[in-house]
Image: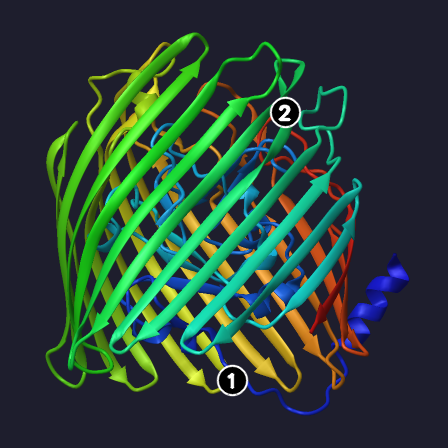
Amino acid sequence: MGKFIKVIVTVFLVTSTHLSAETFLDKVVVTPLKKPTKIFNTFNNVQVITSKDIKLQGYKSINEILSRSSSISIGSNGGHGQTKSVFLRGTESNHTKVLINGVNLNPGTLGVPSIQHISVDMIESIEISKGSMSTLYGKDTIGGVINIITKKNQGNQISINRGTHNTNNFVYSGGFDYLNHNFSTNFSRLESDSYKAKVTSTKNHKYDTTNLDLNYIMNIGYNEISTNYYRSTGNTEYDSFGSNLNQNHRDSHIKFNINHIFSNSHLDLFYVKKTNEINQAAPSATDYTHTKVNALGLEYMIPINELDHILFGIDYADEAMYELSYGTSFKHTNKIKQAYASSTFSATNNLQTNLGIRVQNHSTYNNFTSGNIGINYYINPKLVLSSALAKSFRAPDATDLFGYGGNNKLTPEESKTSEISLRYRISDDESFAGTFFHNRITNLIESDGTKMQNINKAEITGIDISYARYVNDTKYDIQYTYQEPKDKTNNVVLSRRPRNRMVGNVTHFFKNAESVAITTTYESNRDNSIYDTNQLGSYFLVDVNYLKNIHGYTMGFKINNLLDKNYRLAHNYNTGGRSFNLSIKSNF
């Protein structure tokens, strides 16, 4: 292994022709303002991970991708298919809204989205918008929004992956155009023996999942009609108090859009039908949790110039939730009506403002108003100072209210967030961004040991730093987050949130479509739970990915946890040791 590391180090001492560089501040995102915007011009801290990044780093799971953001700490109850939790900027795992092509993946019952079932190979980009996003995306956005966008019309590609724990993955992505019609398909099938979920488990816990993503676009005059269908189904074995059980999952949606372009504006009409299901699969098991949503609405946008615009939106959702767990069952329906507006306006050549407001009528919680204020001050064309204030909330999910240990007297959690950012485009090859953030949360919902209560207050303060530079044929990228995530009620640090996270990446490119990437991750120690005294220790991981193009085939070899470090992302649950993955991709 020592010789291998020496070879990797030697690679980065070799240089050839200069890269055509695009730093992270020049990347275009849609999520923060619902219009294409360079990260340099956004009002809040945004990170984007593209399909090119996924390919170069050799990512094989969504949680692996997200953990490469220093702002995100991942909780994991084992290997493939086991529950994964996302803690963005120190907020709770149900404080971040996860979208697939703009459709909410968070269920109305358990609240935490099943990101572990999403196929990485069908992703075009992931946009991580940090901080409250309630104006444009409503409830459950105290931590931010993660928008996963799938590939469309990318040509035909087949990928075969073989990895440790007898893990096999077959992927097809492709599409075609015919006259004014465009069709695209993403398909993935993954099977794995995985590893023992718990330290005390007696067997490996198998997992399989099938993902299907279909897209259709038709252009007729000034109208674009589009449909997106997404479905993820499969089975996960898991350890339940020493018993080996298994459950089936299904996440699906269908979304219809009609976009009409006027002379100086456009109108988008949409309808969404989505389902989130988990069903226990043992012969005698009866437990389940289901969410079914029907939603429709419209958005009307008036672009003023490249930076400024006005947006109006209204929507209505019918949310039905059903659950049977530990002998407690419920059926509950919410009717949600919302109206929102957002405006970006350049007061001077140097000053740009963003104002937004959302009014929601919730059949369970009556009315709630949230909103935001943002300011960009352009010190010069390469340097911008931003500030943002926002109010957001999370309505208790149905399991909080009516499930085992539930409490139907709960009130929504509320947050007030603020941040100040400095983004500096040092040169065409070098960028820096730094953000100070503060988040105050009241009515935080926790269990008192018998049932859920609004018993806690939280305050999270921290900084995010990102730096990227291209030097000849090598890209250097480093991110660091320091945060103080405090439970003010109990005067302790919030569980599973580290004070320090650092992620570094070095990628070297060769002349013949060949590259080597080394990614390092450091996370400091953190408490497992306020209900025990267990600690999750700090860890340092090294991953390596090698790519080479051979006669039209892209060969990939990935080593995760190169140093074979033992670490935990949840108490008593295993993580993977050193693992290997070999992939072959072909375009046709």
**Quadrant location of the N terminus?**
bottom right
Q: Is residue 350 above or below residue 561?
A: below
Q: CA distance from mark 2 to mark 1?
A: 44 Å
Q: Nearer the viewer, residue 468 or 106?
A: 106
Q: Which mark is residue 429?
A: 1
Provide the secondary structure element on which disc 1 rests.
loop
Of residues 461 and 21, which is closer to you in this image?
21
User: Would residue 101 be visible to someone looking at this image?
Assistant: yes
Question: Residue at position x 27%, y 78% from top?
Answer: 221
Q: Classify residue 345 by image quadrant.
A: bottom left
**Residue farthest bottom in this picture:** 17
**How crowded is the residue under tag 2: few (<14 C-alpha within 10 Å), some, or many (20+)?**
some
Q: Are marks 2 and 1 in contact (CB under 8 Å)?
A: no
- From the viewer's perspective, is residue 443 above or below residue 323? below
Q: Please tell me the numbered disc located at residue 399.
A: none
Sequence-first tag of 2 and 1:
1
Amino acid type indicated by mark 2: Asn
